Image: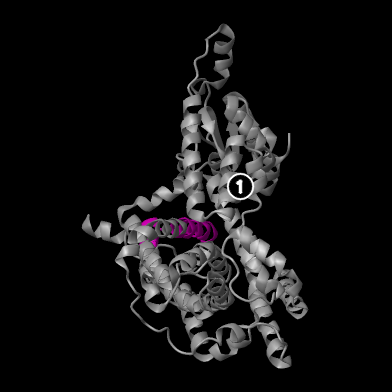
Amino acid sequence: MKSSRMYTWLPKSVESLKGYKRSDLIADLTSGITVGLVALPLAMAFGISSGVTPQAGIYTAIIAGFLISALGGSRCQIGGPTGAFVVVIAAIISKHGLSGLLMVTMMAGCILIFLGLTGLGSAVKYIPRPVIIGFTNGIAVLIASTQIKDFLGLKVAGQVPSEFIERMRFIFEHIRTTDLLTVILTLLSLAVILLMPRITRRVPGSIIALVGVTACVASFGIPVETIGTKFGGIPTGLPHFALPEFRQDLIIPLLPAALTVAILAAIESLLSAVVADSMSGDRHNSNVELVAQGIANLTVPFFGGIPVTGAIARTATNIRSGARSPFSGIIHAVTLLFIILFAAPLARFIPLGTLAAVLFVVAYNMGEWREIPMILRLSSKDISVWLITFILTVVADLTIAVEVGMTLAALLYIYQVSRSTVVAPLTTETLEEAKNHIVQDHNIPHYVSMFHVQGPFLFGSAEKLHKLALSVDKLQPVVILRLRYMTAIDATGIYAIEQFYEKLHASGRMLILCGVRGEPRKILLNSNLPRLMGARNILPNIRSALHRAETIEEGFGGIGDDAAAGLAEAPA
């Protein structure tokens, strides 16, 4: 029993040692070096936009990248600084200085370790989808707004205001100081980053833009603002160890910020781990991953680093490059270390406009913009939670946005649950209609797996369908999800069904929904589900669902058959 319990806390790096071959090492070397090169411009850009030095971002990526890969619970996760923290970090530095930021990072690390050790980290999955989308949209807008100055090369004295409205007013007032050379180089960088994936995905566009534009600036002496002109370059050598200043009087004032950083780190790291699972076929250990994230956040302040979490884009790049184990993440950290040791002097020529272009693309990619149309098709209550969270993230701050969004979502949860209780008369007609929904009167064919949802399917319970999706390979070719006794659904529930469908579809299986009624039916039909899975696969009762399953089975050539998939998805 004791050894079994200890095994559940083993990092993936230790598990990966079993059966590790030379071919795995070669694959990890290739992917690790690739993602290390991808992380270089991002680490510098996140450092600068957060209000610290570019080397602070690189030091963070090196130390956190090593620790998260060595100690984490995800096989291919890449850790480091991300865009989610940029706005929070900048606000903390403006109020409490760098020492306050280091304290917040260490406090957040302690909170993450506590969440992992107690298993409470799983509570982050109960944050409603509209709240996540709202503050993700807001963070993306804020990141883009912080880069406008460097994107345009505005020549201004003093600091750009940290508040969004004041920042935009400041930029508008100084728009006449735009530098044409900077704009040209920045647009060139942006074009390279966006167009390179269409030419080849073997070399990241951000690296081509960084190297190409930097070479032009260095060779021709183009007079634009660079890392060298603003920061004096990046020092060569190992990260410098120093004890952060600890002020006991700031613990309580900094606690809300530390909680925000910890929640953000937990959400983004676990979302990234889920993405990694879906791409690699592995299954991460949430608690081990959170402990590793906590240790990394507790460690980086000793080297002047900033908060870290799992990086979804770099993790996806790592897997697409062929990563097979956490050693690719360790190699990514070593790659960055070699760059800082041997190529740091060259960094002084990197234009800030190029880094701004990198962050513009990051802001767009992390914005979850494709989710907005789905949110807008749902109930006005879900829309209001999303919109309020988004607006507060932009014009107030992230802590307030998450608090208000969660409070509204909790109140709406209570409201929806209370409405799910119905008192209605039983008549001859309703009894006759009910016969179409009785499962006992029908035989379930061998090619059908059937499940039902009973009660409200809201953000607090949608995770149960995600667990079912993890064992999709054990299901029959046709899966029927019976929603007759589902009394309420929200955006998170819709999203869970969409993800379940995507998982089934990727494995060559079919999904049929049946029996949904009342208000949940209106929400479901207004969502993206009818377009995604085909309206003929959303049926009124179990009888019609079984008939539809029989039709699919007749044209089914086996799991993964494309013709059967087309049959299942054909519009009504």
Horizontally, residue 265 falls left or right of residue 369, namely left
The magenta span reads 265-291
Q: Is residue 554 above or below residue 45?
A: above
Q: Is residue 152 magenta?
A: no
Estimate the x, y position of residue 524 in percent, counting from the top left.
Answer: 62, 34
Q: What residue sits 46% from the left and 47% below the top? A: 403
Q: Is residue 296 left or right of residue 504?
A: left
Q: Amino acid at mark 1?
A: His
Q: Identify the main secondary structure in magenta.
A: helix
Q: Position of residue 208 (x, y in %)?
A: 67, 79
Residue 362 to residue 57: above or below: above
- In magenta stretch: residue 272: yes
- Pointer 1: what residue? 505
In the picture provided, is 171 more to the left or to the right than 38? right
From the top left corner, tell me how far across and down residue 187 is, in percent. Answer: 75, 73
| Dot 1 alpha-carbon crowd within 10 angstroms: few under 14, some 14 to 19, many 20 or more | some
From the top left corner, tell me how far across and down residue 1 is, in percent.
22, 54
Q: Is residue 221 visible?
A: yes
Q: Quadrant of the C terminus?
A: top right
